[in-house]
Amino acid sequence: MAWVYLIVAGLFEIGWPVGLKLSQTPGRFVLGVIIAVVCMAASGAFLWLAQRSIPIGTAYAVWTGIGAVGTFAVGIAFYGDSAGAMRLVSVGLIVAGIIGLKLAHGPG
């Protein structure tokens, strides 16, 4: 269950930079900040739950990795961020690192 908590924490980690970006849209400041704060709190709470069973270094690296990769994807899909080859390879290395940490942790 700890890995489910960690994945959920990582997904909420995507929400706060997206909320901050949304807050820069005219008329969306308050909504964006509310989304960012709620996502920060939820992300932290689920990370806390995950760390009861997953070592802190692994949990933190996976959590930030999910947030980074997810935010990267949102930036490309919704904000016109570049999807150049070097950027895609680099984010692929982050994904490989996340998978490696999960495999090194073992089952459960």
Image: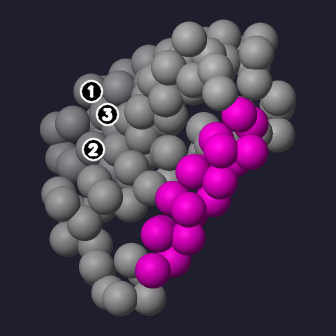
Q: Say which quarter of the image contains residue 45.
A: top right
Q: How dense is the environment of label 3, judged by Cα within 10 Å: few (below 14), some, or many (20 and up)?
A: many
Give the farthest residue toward the bottom.
85
Residue type, label 1: Leu
Question: In the rendering, which numbered label is found on residue 22?
Answer: 2
Crowdedness near tag 1: few (<14), some (14–19) or many (≥20) residues, C-alpha within 10 Å: some
Residue at the spot of label 3: 32
Q: Residue at x 49, y 29 (%)?
A: 7
Task: Give the answer, above or below, for where 34 lies relative to 22.
Answer: above
| Vertical side of 84 occupied by 9: above or below | above
Query: Which residue lies at the image location 56% right of the left edge and 11% below the top edge?
Result: 1
69 horizontally vs 24: left or right:
right
The secondary structure type at the circle numbered 1 is helix
Q: Which residues are magenta?
A: 89-106
Q: Secondary structure at mark 3?
A: helix
Q: Nearer the viewer, residue 42 or 3?
A: 3
**Could you tell whether 46 is left or right of 32 in the image?**
right
Give the mark, 2 or 3, whose residue is nearer the N terminus: 2
Q: Rounded to the nearest whole Å, what is the CA distance between mark 2 and mark 3? A: 5 Å
CB atoms of marks 1 and 2 within 8 Å: yes
Residue 57 coordinates in the image, percent (x, y) = 82, 40
Q: Are marks 3 and 1 in contact (CB under 8 Å)?
A: yes
Residue of label 1 = 31
Cβ atoms under marks 2 and 3 closer than 8 Å: yes
| Residue drawn at point x = 50 percent, y = 20 percent | 4
Residue type pointed to by label 3: Gly
For marks 1 and 2, give the CA distance. 8 Å
Q: Could you give the CA–CA distance between mark 3 and mark 1, rounded to whole angstroms?
A: 4 Å
